Image (spheres, rainbow, N blue to C red):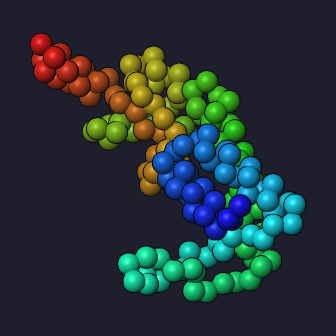
Amino acid sequence: MDPQVSWQELIDALQELDWERVRDLADGLLHWMKHGGFPPETLAVSQLVVGRLSEPTRSLGHDWNRNVAQAACSYALDLATQVLQDPNGIPRGVPFTLSCSDCDSGHPESYDEAVAAGWTDIRFVPQSMAENFLGLCPECRSVDEATSSTTAG
């Protein structure tokens, strides 16, 4: 295993909301480190060298990297497991804040309230700056459906 590649892939999988990959990569890195493997460099400082990224140029040391990587992997594994196990993809303890991905309207108080009001495509987006969930509000869904039926016919 190359823990540095796995670390970067874990970050990419988190950004892509690929929860199965997040779970697998986090679990693999934790297993690697638990069995004596060295940790990835967690400080994301790299230089561009002849068209490619070089290895990180600064480090806070082995203990820092091991502790940060273990904490991040444990968090990512727990979060991915929660999202994958919940039928609606909602992890425990995450406040339900929702905006429309098309028009930024809405703000139902709960997942059930949003579904009852006609929201669709609700998904957990932890990297969002404003909301924990994005979805399609009833008004935008109607516009999308009208546009789809016009172009299909």
Q: Position of residue 131 (x, y in %)?
A: 46, 46
**153 horizontally vs 89: left or right:** left
In the depicted view, which residue is nearer to us: 103 or 9? 9
At horizontal 67% and vertical 45% (from top left) the residue drawn is: 23
**102 horizontally vs 121: left or right:** left
At horizontal 51% and vertical 80% (from top left) the residue drawn is: 54
Is residue 68 visible from the viewing direction of this image? no
At horizontal 21% and vertical 24% (from top left) the residue drawn is: 143
In this view, 11 is above or below 23: below
In this view, 64 is above or below 153: below
In this view, 119 is above or below 6: above
In the depicted view, which residue is nearer to us: 112 or 146? 146
Quarter holding residue 7: bottom right
Quadrant (top left/top right/bottom left/bottom right) for the C terminus: top left
In the depicted view, which residue is nearer to us: 4 or 73? 4
Is residue 130 visible from the viewing direction of this image? yes
At horizontal 53% and vertical 29% (from top left) the residue drawn is: 110
In the depicted view, which residue is nearer to us: 137 or 86? 86
Quarter holding residue 21: top right
Q: Position of residue 26 (x, y in %)?
A: 70, 52
Q: Position of residue 136 (x, y in %)?
A: 35, 30
Quarter holding residue 39: bottom right
Q: Position of residue 18 (x, y in %)?
A: 54, 43
**50 horizontally vs 3: left or right:** left
Quadrant (top left/top right/bottom left/bottom right) for the N terminus: bottom right
**143 horizontally vs 77: left or right:** left
Residue that protrudes farthest toward the right in the picture: 35
